[in-house]
Image (cartoon, grey):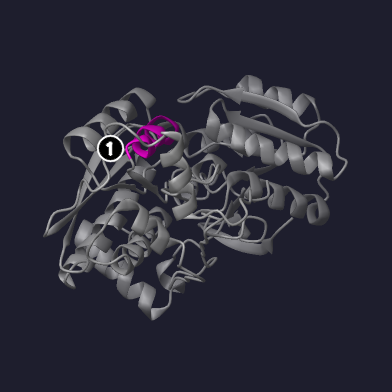
Amino acid sequence: MIRRKFGKLGVAAISALLLASGATTGAKAAGQGITDTEIILGTHQPLSGPVALWGVPVTNGMRMAIEEINEAGGINGRQITLIVEDTAYQQNKAAQAADKLLKKDKVFAMVGPLGTPPNMVVMPRALKMDVMNIFPLTAAREMYEPLHPLKFAYFTPYTDQMRAAVKYLVENEGVKKVGVLYQDDDFGKNVLDGCVEQAAEMGLPEVVTTNFKRGAKDFSSQIAQLSAAGVDLVCLGTIIGETIGSVATARKIGYDAKFLVSSAGYVPENITLAKGLTEGLYGAGQTPIPYYEDATPEVKAWMDKYKARFDRDAVLQSVAGYELIHTFAIALRNAGKDLDPFKVGAALEQIKDRGSMFGGTEVSFSKDDHLGPDARNSASLFKVQGDKWIKISNISY
């Protein structure tokens, strides 16, 4: 999926159009969450349930970044407060979180909210109130399409990750037939779309597809279907438990297809919790997982600080939370003392080629493009080898 372009329309023009159409009339939140001394930010995270292995370290990374910013004097004299609500990766809880954060806590922006299904519930409510939806922890294309002055995305889209990875594996690993096992929701369908689009472009046989409901634990019928169809590359629209469960099921019956997971499953836990079952699993992502023994002195110092603060090791999810806050802080600072969401959006559009001490792709934004990375050329392919994810190649399509 190529990023959608919107010509010369930027924040100011789109805002004017919305006002002219009456789309922004009614009870508005513009200016809420700002006092003389404080900027109140909100986030919804799966702090419980199976996706807490994402939500907890992301939240820790965000908190660590905010503490650093506040200790350095804050943003133009204001301290940042972060209010976190647990969704357990459930849409009904996400709706409850949205009501509290938007209407009771009156947050200025949603930052790093995690999960495609929760964001699909909360994001429209926030945008309707002129509350920003900033750098959600999901790589679904809906996080930046269609263009909106108050929503920005930070991560290479699932669709593009999978397209690039499928292309590489067909060209370099002899893959002949692709299948997709995906979570039956917007997240899984983004993964599905990428694999189907790339297979069609390369003239491969029709993709074999099978899905599961969130929280599923038995994948025997889906794996049997893929095996019987002769699929030699299984694209996974899974996160952690479902990744391990599906690959383990395949290993148990002697099905030796290659398995590929998106950035949602490219995490250390898909090695540490799998006890060897995920050996050889491929993963697409945009940032290398930090391993202490391989890290630069700067990253080692950061990992030491994180462990001292939270009494646990930093993981890739921690990096994501940390980086997104520091990037948003640039825009908050550059927007000046008199903050409103549209000024901050315009300031975000000025960020160019922002890199990271952790490596990976740079991010840039513009008036007609609110996706940070270059979708077609910003992913890398990794593979589980022993106790680490090892980088195989930069990938593109």
What number of labels is visible?
1
Q: Which of 343 and 194 lies nearest the eye of the viewer?
A: 343
Q: Magenta span covers which residues?
A: 119-129
Is residue 318 inside the magenta stretch? no
Q: Secondary structure at mark 1?
A: loop
Side of 172 relative to 129 (left or right): right
Could you tell me residue 232's position as x and y percent? 77, 39
Measuring 18% from the left and 66% from the top, which residue is drawn there? 70
Vertical comparison of 118 with 295: above or below: above
Is residue 128 inside the magenta stretch? yes
Magenta span: helix, strand or loop, mainly?
Answer: helix
Side of 287 relative to 195 (left or right): left
Q: Which residue is mark 1?
A: 28
Side of 319 relative to 202 (left or right): left
Side of 325 relative to 367 (left or right): left
Could you tell me residue 231's position as x and y percent? 77, 34
Measuring 49% from the left and 23% from the top, which residue is drawn there? 216
Rendering quarter of residue 238: top right
Rendering quarter of residue 236: top right
Measuring 60% from the left and 37% from the top, which residue is drawn there? 190
Vertical comparison of 239 with 383: above or below: above
Where, quadrant-wise, is the C terminus in this rendering?
Answer: bottom right
Measuring 29% from the left and 56% from the top, which residue is drawn there? 62
